[in-house]
Each structure stands twice: as structure tokens, then as C-alpha cells.
Amino acid sequence: MFKKQRSLIGLDIGTNSVKAVELTQFGSELVLTAYGQNEIVSEAQRADAVVDLLQGRNFRTRRVVTAVSGKSVIVRYLTMIQMSDDDLKNAIKFEADKYIPFDVDEVVLDAQRLEGAPGAKAGLAENEMRVLLVAVKRSLIEDHVQLVKSIGLQPEIIDVDAFALGNAWELRNQLSPGVEDQERVVALLDVGANKTNINVLRGGSSHFTREIYLGSDDFTSAIAKRMGCEPHQAEQLKRDPGDHFETVRDAVLPSIDDLANEIHLSFDYFENQSDRAVDDVLLSGGGSLLKLVPETFEKVFEKRVRHWDPTENLKVDADAVDVEALRQNAASVAVAAGLAARIRKD
């Protein structure tokens, strides 16, 4: 008998690059069947960068899940009176006005109860529940959908970057032979070009998210300013400082310190609200590959900080995927892998 096959592409369209991971379900088996990433030269060439990425890399489907982020995306964790899911959908339209800085008619709303996670009832009255509220400006979603459709792709879901990180972590744990401690608090930090995403998870459930508008472009700008060179030269020095290591380190450390301190403030807020410390800090994103980033984070957080590979437990089709390139760039594909992981709920 032939196994039923379904494929889905996780498409992460960032500021400086686009990443794509395709997962295919063969019966009960999940296989990574295509991967690629490409630089985005300019805003006007974003669509071209996606087209170039998908060509010649054996992608099986045109079905994609993408994500939005930025100041037009609002995430709030609310305490509400216990109610059914149907009633929650109606009630959230009236509650949202209190928590979002936009007119409710300008946004797409979604809400989900946070039950079932360890500690979900902590600090709540018997008739209360915790609710995750997400509001995204409708114009941002429409622009994103239009971009995807303009290059012949079929958008299935529009997600949020921080939640895609959580989905990637959940998939990794489901495929792991070990047993995950459901009480451990894991902070996922994805350092991108112009922002850093935080998603704090407990028991597989998101309990805190934040976007910090600092990233690897700030490191590049600091090098360019210190050394009086062009941005593309500074980018090369950031990746390979060679004999200029001391100068590069001195240039970027203030920016990395600023980012670490902002993240630390977020941890403090989460820990004060939940009365639970962050146990593990896991890094992803191209900006996290600079050696000074995990070193500085460990000093500021006083916690162990390590990278993680969102594809490490996935079976990979070596005939269709450049496995070496995938492993070398694993830190950069966490969001894309998390988006593709939606195939499990397809």
C-alpha cells in the first residue's frame, strides 16, 4: 500500500534573508524533504529572493505557512472568567479594545485558552482562566498574503514568529527519545537582523513573548561606525574578523550588552509574574552565531546559554536536501521549521 503523502513549506521571510523548510508526512513519518535560504538584497527584491530560493531545490508543494511580526502584531496574556471556546470568540471582540492600541475593526483577532499547562491555574480564582490574545493589523496580513500569492504560492496559515519558535521546539521534543521535564521553563531567543524574538515556554505552552528591536544589523552598524567602512565590509568583518578581532569585539559589545539587558528585564518580568525562574536559555537566529553573543548572555543572565538545532531529530531526505548546508545553518531555520511543523495539525 502507498502511504498518504502531504507536504507543507514553512516560509520565513526576514529582513535580510528568506528561509524555507518543507516537511512531508509519509503516513505517520515526518521527513524534511526540501530546504533553502537566500539573501534579500533590497525590499523591492523580496519576491524575487523567494522565487530564486524555491527554484531548483526539489520543493514538492506550493502550500506555505508564513509568519508576521513587528509593531503591528500585539500579543497579550489575559485573565478572564471561565467560558466555552465559542463564548470566548465572541467575548474577545469586546475585551480586545482594552488591550490593543488599534481600532478593533482594523485587526484580525484570535484567542486561545491556556489550560492544561503546568501552573496554568496558579494565582487564578476557581472561575478564572488564562487566555492568549493575538491581534494583527489586517493591512499587514493582506500585504503578506498578496506577496505570497504574487509568486504563485498558496498561503495556508499566517502565524507569528514567536509562536513558530515554540512550534519548532515542541516538534523537536516530540521526536526526541528523551522525556521532557514538563515543569522546566525554557526561554527561546531568536536573534534576527533587526529584532530578537523571545518566547518563554512551560509545559509546551507559551507564557511570555516579546520582540526587542535589536539584532545583528545593529552589530554590523557598530562595526561600520567604529572602522569607518561600508556596511557590506562590516558584515564580512562581523562573520570573520581575522586580525581585527579586538576592534570588532569592542565595537559590538555595547550593542550585545544592550540586547542582553533588555532580555534580562523580560526574564525578570516573567519571573515576577509567574514566581518561576527561567531554567534553560536556547539560542537561534543568524545573529546568535557571533561568538560574543552567547558569551555575553551567560554573563548577564548568570545562566547556561546554548544553541539548539530545530532539525536534529527530523529524518532528512539526503537525495533532495543539502544536509551539510542544513546543519551549518540550523540556527537560522528555527522559525521556518516551526512554520512547517503546522503540518502536524493539518
Image (spheres, helix red, strand yellow):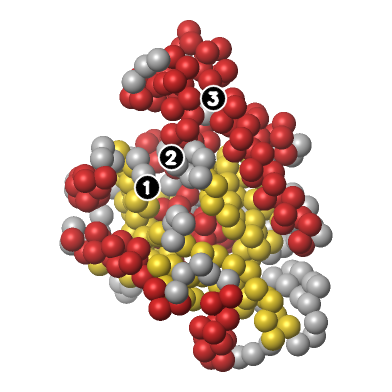
- Residue found at x 39% / y 35%: 324
| Residue located beneath label 3 in the image | 252
Which of the 4 image quadrants contains residue 104?
Answer: bottom left
Q: Position of residue 18 (x, y in %)?
A: 33, 46
Q: Position of residue 45 (x, y in %)?
A: 21, 44
Between discs 2 and 3, the one toward the N terminus:
2
Q: Which mark is residue 14?
A: 1
What whole-number distance in Å separates the C-alpha atoms at marks 3 and 1?
A: 22 Å
- Residue found at x 42% / y 73%: 107
| Residue located beneath label 2 in the image | 193
Image-based side of 81 in relation to 291, left or right: right
Q: Position of residue 87 (x, y in %)?
A: 56, 91
Helix, strand or loop at mark 3 = helix
Q: Position of residue 206 (x, y in %)?
A: 62, 63
What whole-number distance in Å separates the C-alpha atoms at marks 2 and 3?
A: 14 Å
- Contact between marks 2 and 1 (CB within 8 A): the answer is yes
Q: Can residue 7 be seen here? A: no
Q: Can residue 121 be seen here? A: yes
Helix, strand or loop at mark 2 = loop
Among all residues in the image, which is located at the extreme top? 243
Between discs 3 and 1, the one toward the N terminus:
1
